[in-house]
Amino acid sequence: MLILGIAGGTGCGKTTVVNQIVAQLPENEVGIISQDSYYNDLAHLTKEERGEINFDHPNSIDFDLLISHLEQLKQGKTINKPVYSFVEETRLEETIPTIPRKVMIVEGILVLSNPQLRDLFDIKIFVHADSDERLIRRLQRDIRERGHDLQKVLTRYQTAVKPMHEQFIEPSKEFADIIIPNNHYNTVAVDIVRTIINDKLL
Ligand SMILES: Nc1ncnc2c1ncn2[C@@H]1O[C@H](COP(=O)(O)OP(=O)(O)O)[C@@H](O)[C@H]1O
Ligand SMILES: Nc1ccn([C@@H]2O[C@H](COP(=O)(O)O)[C@@H](O)[C@H]2O)c(=O)n1
C-alpha cells in the first residue's frame, strides 16, 4: 500500500487537488480519507457548546482513531470510517465501511503536524495558497456548503483558524516532500503526483 498525506491551510485546495488526482485513476485502486471525518464526537454537547470548540487545534481531532484506522487498512482490514456533519458540528451515527486500496490518500489541515500519523505516510505533500486567497475561498465555501454565515466565518478565522494555522499548520510544511503552489489551478503538479501513483499501480 502507498499512503499519501496531503496537508495545507483551510481553503488551500486540498480536497480539490485530491479530486483532480483521483479523477483519472482507476476508481477501485485509490481510497481517500479526510481528517475532517475524524473530528471528535461532540454528541454530548449542545449545538451552542459545539460552536465554542476550536476546530483548528490538534486536540479537536481523534488522531488515535485515524492512526488506528490507517494501521488496520495497511493490514488489509476494512474500517468503519466516521461521518462528520459540518452543519451539526458533530459525528453522525452512521459510518462508511472502507476497504483497503493499493493507494490511500489522507488529507487534512493537520495531517503533517502529528508525528505518529506522519510516519505512516510514504509521500508527504503540502498544498500552498496565500492566506487572503484561502480566506476568500473559505468564506464562499462555508456559506455555500457548510451552513455558516459571514460573521461566523470571519470570527472563527480571527480567533482560531489564523492563530492555529500559524502555530501548527504552516510549521508542518517543513515535513513535506512536495509543495504544490495552488494560488491558481496547478495541473502540472497534479499530473506529477498522478504519475507517481500510476507507477505504483503498474
Ligand atoms: N486553485 C484554485 N483556484 C480557485 N479556487 C479554488 C482552487 N482550488 C480550490 N478552489 C476552491 O476553493 C474552495 C476551497 O477548496 P477546497 O478544495 O475545499 O480546500 P480545502 O480542502 O483545502 O479546504 C472550493 O470552493 C474550491 O472549489
Ligand atoms: N464544525 C466545524 C469543524 C471544522 N471547521 C473548519 O474546517 C476547517 C478544516 O477543513 P478544510 O476542509 O477547510 O481543510 C478548519 O479550519 C475548521 O475551522 C468548521 O468550520 N466547522
Image (cartoon, grey):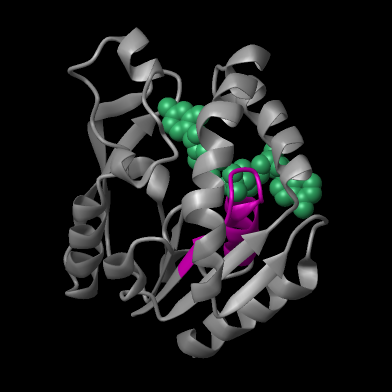
Q: Residue at x 28, y 27 (%)?
A: 92
At a point 64% along the width and 43% down the height, the residue shown is 11
184 to the left or right of 160? right
How far across and down, in percent of the image, does residue 194 sit? 62, 76
Q: Position of residue 148 (x, y in %)?
A: 57, 17
Which quadrant holds residue 10?
top right
Q: Quadrant of ligand 1?
A: top right
- Asked if one can make out residue 149 in the rendered structure from this viewpoint, the answer is no
Residue 33 image offset from top left, x and y in percent: 39, 55
Q: Seen in the image, is 113 located left or right of residue 131?
A: left
The residue stretch that appears in magenta: 5-22
Residue at x-position 18% and y-position 60%: 68
Asked if the stretch drawn in magenta spans residue 10, the answer is yes
- Looking at the image, residue 17 sits to the left or right of residue 101; the answer is right
What is the x, y in percent for residue 23? Answer: 62, 61
Q: Is residue 142 above or below residue 80?
A: above
Question: Considering the image in quadrants, where does the N terminus appear?
Answer: bottom left
Place residue 76 in its image quadrant: bottom left
> Is 167 in the magenta?
no
Q: How many marks?
A: 0
59 or 41: nearer the viewer: 59
Is residue 189 positioned above or below 97 on the image? below
